[in-house]
Image (spheres, grey):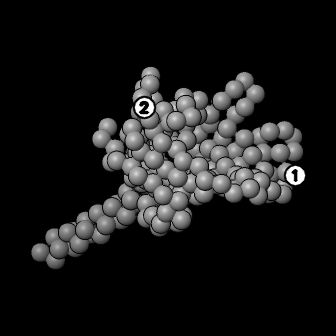
Amino acid sequence: MRRCAAVVLGLVALMGCVRRAETEGQEVAAPAEYYPLSVGNRWTYDVTFLGEKREHTVELVGEREGFFVDREGTRIGVDAFGVWDGKRYLLRGPLREGQAWNNMVSVSSLERYRVLAAGVRCTAPAGAFRDCVQVEARNRVDAKTTLVNTLTFARGVGIVRVETVAEIDGRQVPQASRALASYAVKPTTR
């Protein structure tokens, strides 16, 4: 009887270890859940570009060739791999820290993406968000300069923040920032 109890306790402890290992580093959700796409969805951002401040609104106004399209003609879609604009994946599963992928956007331009954090909190003028994914995108411009975009996505909301810096000879020079000021999105139904 004591041996049976010891085996049961051992199995319970082992199950606890397996369960913990399964959740550590686990993907937080599907990429599509971090960029809700539906006609009428709207995001307004406070934008700073080289010191100049302005507001910019992105609104999805239609669908064309498998993509949602905004008022400026920019397209965004979701496929089995993630969220993309037809040239690059902004989010690609599995969404867990360290996950990396490359996008060849032209003959001379390779963008390198990496998930910096998943399942974290973030803030913007629009509020505080609990389940966010932060992604770094790097694109080497020349021998001395690399553009680095850090994008933060909130589950059920979309892009909450974008910070752009130019790394020039190892120094980081701020270029632009975009922070979500307000939004109106419908839940994703796809």
Q: Which mark is residue 104?
A: none
- Residue of label 2: 62
The three-letter amino acid code for the residue at tag 2 is Gly
Dot in front, 1 or 2: 2
Q: Which residue is located at x 80 percent, y 52 percent?
A: 167
Asked if 124 appears above or below 105 in the picture, the reply is below
Residue 25 in the image: state x and y as whole percent. 46, 57
For disc 1, the neighbor class at 10 Å (few under 14, some 14 to 19, many from 20) is few
Q: Secondary structure at mark 2?
A: strand
Q: Earlier in the sequence, mark 1 or mark 2?
A: 2
Left or right? Give the position of 46 relative to 60: right
Question: Looking at numbered disc 1 in the image, what kind of residue is underneath it?
Answer: Asp
Q: What percent of the width, then of the height, locates residue 28?
A: 41, 54
Residue 178 visible, this orientation: no
Q: Quadrant of the C terminus?
A: top left
Q: Is 96 located above or below residue 71 in the figure?
A: below
Residue 169, numbered label: 1
Find the distance from the CA under tag 1 to the CA under tag 2.
Answer: 43 Å
Answer left or right for 24 relative to 159: left
Q: How many marks?
A: 2
Q: Which residue is depicted at the point 78% across and 50% down?
A: 166
**Which of the two residues, 58 or 14, is positioned nearer the viewer here?**
58
Q: Position of residue 153 (x, y in %)?
A: 50, 53
Q: Can you see residue 64?
A: yes
Quadrant, the N terminus: bottom left
How far across and down, in percent of the image, does residue 22 sit? 37, 57
Tell me the element at label 1: loop
